[in-house]
Structure formats: structure tokens, C-alpha cells
Image (spheres, grey):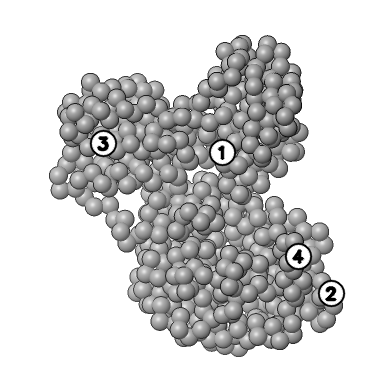
Amino acid sequence: MYPNLLSAIKIRGLELRNRVVYPAMGTKMATADKFVTEQLINYHLARVQGGSGLNILEVSSVLESASPSKFVSIAHDRYLPMLTRFNEVLHEAGGATGVQLWLGGVAVASDPTARILTPSPLPLGPGYVVPAMTGEDIEAAIEAFGQAAARSVAAGFDTLEFHAAHGYTPHMFLSGALNQRTDEYGGSLANRARFLLRSIEAIRANIPEQMPLFMRVDAQDDYLDGGLTTDEVIQFCKWAGDAGVDVLDVSRGNLFGPALKYEVPSIDLPRGFNVANAARVRRETGLLTMAVGRINRADQAEEILASGQADLVVMGRAQLADPDFVAKVSTGREDDVIYCIGCNQGCYDGFVSPDMPHITCLRNPSVGLEAESELRPTTDPKIVYVAGGGVAGIQAATLLHRRGHHPVLFESTGELGGQFLLAGMAPRKAEMREAAQAMGQTLLKEGVEVRLHTQLTPDKLIGADALVVAIGATPILPTFPGRHLPNVYDSHDVLSQTVFPTGRVVVIGGGLVGLEVAEYLTGKADSVTVLEMLGAVGEDIGQIRRIAVMEELGGAGVRMIPGATCKEITPSAVLYRKDGEVEGLPYDTVVIAIGSRSRATWPLEERAADLGIPCHVIGDAKQARRAIQAIKEATEAARAID
């Protein structure tokens, strides 16, 4: 069905079974002292067993002094035993392995003991400037790349990837925006490329002739004045090819501002947004090329390869969401694929959050828990009532059914999907609506008993052996006067297209939902103004999605007033207090978007207790939060019921 995607490819002495690459992604699964763990091995093993053609171990530090905690290191021989085990396990399962050689620059600042290496002085705060690398530092770094390459061979990796993108040290040398040196490593493109080319030569000198060398490179510098152009990148890639690079992994983005949105692209960016860049680099360099950037469907990947835009495709989050992605599409089971939706809630937000031990995935809570997450069949089938047909209830009912229980799902409306369906009505979020619909279709296809237009009330619990409550939340209604006036609506009314605000619209609430309503109304209303009581809008949005949302709102002319506490809605104006003064904002329509509150679960909980029925409250019914918590709690509840 996918002759290009599923075809083998030989690069020097390495033959890959298909064109799908699982890329290097930071996980926080390494130990505090930077060793590969069994957890990290099992995480990769699941993708190998699911059919991935090449698995590249995440950013691995080549220099001990610049190696941050919780990141893999390959900077010393003491790391070799676990690196070797990584390869032994994945090879035994039929996988091909690579390791990404990394010198992280400012990205290592997460660990205050790790040294930041930068070509030019870099201000990082008031009175703190990171000094430029000395000539000795440069020589030591080049030597470290060579030694790390030799260790990679000793550990049994099939290939290496030199990371020259994303604002890390090599990229900083290459970029005219980040390199202000005046010696032989700065100035002209040839000089700025010198550090990278010498590092590539050191790597190549320490690996066998038949071992291919990959390189991750940015197609261009975004949001950096004086940064790399695509023409410069292409010229550098030609030199890199002469120095021994075989495959170009054409990425985009950096750590220095809004360009971060391209590094871990969210649902706000089009699928395949960077493919044209990969195609141009491939065409003008003549080198094998990998395309990356929201490639999450087999037909999309096949078209990229068939049209000659790339030779391999990076499908990272596609396989994060579903480790069996390749196996499913190769056996005609595409309807069973769990698709990435670009929410970034687990893969990026989970990586940068100090509250999360490692990355995860909204659609796959088993990420990082592969060894302990096997869905164990029950030995004592039970009738389990599930209240609520949103994504939490669907997830729980589906997994309970697969374990051998008999779930019965009750949904008071005529449609499955809940708030995820509504979220999918916001701009650029159709993939979320599609995901919710697909979950509902899977539930029905697998034969789970579903009772639509039926609310599960306490009197209906007799006959159940266990209960899962996933009845969600409702919009919070304001306490200030005026909420019952005509032309005052809540956000659900707008996104569900029950009402159609026009004229001058005031949105009260500048969190995610309020901003999505504001963007949804641009072009439909004459003007849109957002009032937010906190000091900044969008505080509940993940970092990368917030970049995209704020750019869209700014471009659409939406006015945002943070630090504004609404006091009253009069028939002609919204009154709010800001900086101690009360001001009035004329309106034609007001939309309330100040959050959600869990629905009352106590009637079901008390009745279940009376009947001696175990009860699990999950998702927004437990506490109004993000979908990632709802799916996780649903999965845990389904596994806990024996």
C-alpha cells in the first residue's frame, strides 16, 4: 500500500528496513548522572517492535563539562556498558540504531553545573555574560566529538547524527546572528563553518568507512536578524557532504525566541510545513535527505517520498502517540492508528515541566512506562458503568473492554467526544475533533455497549460491579452583575456555533479558551477585546502553543487588556478595574470564558458507596484540567479494576 515508505534503503553499509526514522528526542529518562536506563531502552524497544526503520538515541553530550543532568552522555567510557546494552536489546529486536552527538550550548543551562559553550559572549541576565569559547575550548570540543564517535562505534551503534541545529553550539558558530567572532572561526560563512567541518572530520576519522553519518541542520534561521539563509545552509551542507556527511536531517527552529515553535511544532502549524525546505536542500546538494515537521500520517509520508522531496521521513511524535504506527499501516490497519494531534502537552510541556518526571503523550499515557503498561486481561470480568462519553470515558470504556470486562457507557447527549469535540471547533484544532470522533468510532467498532441520550443517575447503578465517573465540567458563571443580560453568552455557546456574536465583542477571560474564542471571532466581529484579570494572557497555554496563538491574535488585531478585573456588565458597557481605576468598555456582545468547574459527582459516589461498588472519578469530573490528565486517569482506572 505504501511502496516507498515501506521500502528498504541502503546508506553506505547500513540497510534500513523502511524509510521511517524515530528521531532523537529529549525524554528526561536518563539518570541524574547521565546514564541510559532500562526505562529508556524499553521506550525505544516498543518503537522498534512496532516497525520503526531507524531509532536515534536522544541528544547525547560529547563533552563532560557541558553534560547536563538527566540527559544521556557519551562523554566518558563509563557510559559504555548501558549504551552497549541499548544497542544489544534493539538489535536483537530487529532495529537499527543511531546516536545524536550533541554539544548543547545554552540548552545545558537546565543544570547549573554544566558549562555553556558559545562562540561569542552571550548575555543571559543582568550582569551575567557567558564568555566566548577560547581556542583551547574549541580544540577540546572538536576532540570530544571525535572521541564520542569512537565510543559510539564501541557501543555498537549503526550510525551517528551530528547535531548542527536548534541553537546549540555548532549552530551558534554557523549562524551570523549568533557568531560575532573576528578570528578564523567568525566572519565569512567559510570561517563560521570551520568549527562544524572540523568536528565532522573528527567524527568521520573515528568511525568505519561503511558507517553512515547523519547531520541535523536548520533550513534557515527564523526570527534572527542576520541569521542563516537557506542559500547559506545549502552551501554549508555541500561542504559537509565533502567532509563525510551522508544524510541531511532538515529541521527548523532555535531556542532564542518565537522560532522555538518550529522545533517542536504544535497543531498550530500545518502538517509537513518544512517539507519544501527539505526538498530544496535535497535538490541542490544531491545528498540523501530526511524530511521532518508534523509528518504524522502514512499517506502524507508516502507522497513526500514518492514525489522525490526526501529519501526518509522523521516520524517522531507519530510513533510517540502510537508505537505500533508502522506495523499498523503496513498491515492495512490504519483505522486503528492513534494519531498525534500536535497538542505538545506531553512531549514538550512534559519535558520542560519540573512537575513531570519524563515526557509522555496525551494520546499514549504509556510513554516511558512501556515495561509496566501491558494491558493485562482480567480473570474476573465485571460489569462496569462509565458515566460520561467524553475522551476520558471513552478511553476507560475501551480499555476495560479490551481487558475482558463489560463496560456500559452512558452519555447524556447524542454524541461521543465531549469537550474535545468543542475544542476542535477552535481555529487550527480540527485534528482534536477528528481524534475524539475516531475514539468514539473505535469504541463502537469494538462492540462496547453505549447508551446515548441517557444520563447515568444514582437509581440506575444497581447491577454494576464498578463505576467510572467521567461527567466532565461546566463553564464557571461569573458572580458580578449583568451576566443575564441579552447578548451575554458563554464560550461554549460560541464554539458550538449556537450563537454568532457580531459587532464589538468583549471576551471576559484570557486563558486558552478565551483566546481561542477571540481568534475564532476575528473576521466575524467588528472588533474583539479580551479582558484578563491576571497580569498576562494565555498563562494556561503551553509555551509553544502560546507563541503561535499570540502571534495569530496580534496579527488579527485583537486587543488584550491584562490585569483587568470585571466588575459589572451594564446594558452598554463592561466595567472593569485596572490599576485601581474603573473603566468602561462599550460592547455589542460579551462572551464569558473564565474557566470550568467540575460537575457534581457526589450523588453517584454516595450511591456507589451504599451499594459497595468501587468508584473512580476521573478527568474534569475530578478537577477541571487539561486533556492529558483525563486520558491518563482513564487509563489508570481501567487498569485498576480487576
Q: Compared to 101, does 225 lie above or below? A: above
Res 187 label: 2
Can residue 49 be seen by looking at this rendering?
yes
The answer to whether mark 3 and mark 1 are in CB contact below 8 A is: no
- Residue 512 percent location from the top left of the image: 58, 37
Mark closer to the chain start, 3 or 1: 1
What's the amino acid at mark 4? Gly
Q: Going 14% across and 44% down the picture, which residue do you hit?
A: 380
Q: Earlier in the sequence, mark 4 or mark 1?
A: 4
For marks 4 and 1, give the one nearer the viewer.
Answer: 4
Residue furthest out toward the front: 580
Count residues near mark 1 (Cα–Cα under 10 Å), then give few for <14, some for 14-19, many for 20+.
many
Mark number, residue 89:
none
Closer to the N terminus: mark 2 or mark 4? 4
Work out how far the residue at label 2 is from the one at label 4, CA to CA, in angstroms: 27 Å
User: Mark 3–mark 2 contact, CB under 8 Å?
Assistant: no
Q: Position of residue 516 (x, y in %)?
A: 61, 34
Residue situated in front as seen by the camera: 65 or 59: 65
Q: Give the residue pinned by disc 3.
A: 615
Residue drawn at (36%, 38%) of the image:
618
How packed is label 3: few (under 14 Cα within 10 Å), some, or many (20 or more)?
many
Front of the two marks 2 and 1 = 2
